[in-house]
Amino acid sequence: MGEFSIFHWLIVLAVVLIFFGGRRIPEVMKGLGEGIRSFKEGMSGASQTPAPPAQAPPAAPAEKPAEEKK
């Protein structure tokens, strides 16, 4: 079988670029990272979900002065 040389890695990179394209690779890597993180959490038994960040309540809309009817 032998070891992979730099030439072999360049061929693998070219094939990946052909299949996925340059724009989809970051999306694929992000999904892969999330999958690995989820797997590690599942294996450790600490399936804690992070709390959503606290958000400030929306500001009350400014009231317009009441128009007088004549």
Image (cartoon, rainbow, N blue to C red):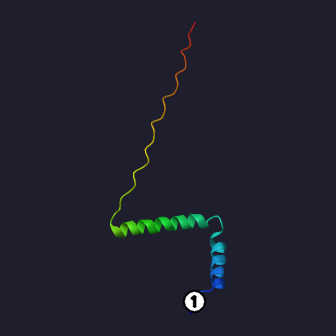
| Residue 13: quadrant of the picture | bottom right
Rendered location of residue 11, percent (x, y): 66, 81
Rendered location of residue 29, percent (x, y): 55, 67
| Residue 14: quadrant of the picture | bottom right
Give the mark count: 1
Q: Residue at x 36, y 59 (%)?
A: 48
Split into 4 quadrants, where in the image is the N terminus? Answer: bottom right
| Residue 55: quadrant of the picture | top left
Rendered location of residue 70, percent (x, y): 58, 6
Circle 1 sits in a helix, a strand or a loop, which is it?
A: loop
Q: Nearer the viewer, residue 20 or 6?
A: 6
Q: Badge 1: how crowded within 10 Å, few (<14), some, or many (20+)?
A: few
Q: Residue furthest top?
A: 70
Rendered location of residue 2, percent (x, y): 57, 92
Task: Describe residue 67's horizontal placement relative to residue 17 as left or right.
Answer: left
Q: Amino acid at mark 1?
A: Glu
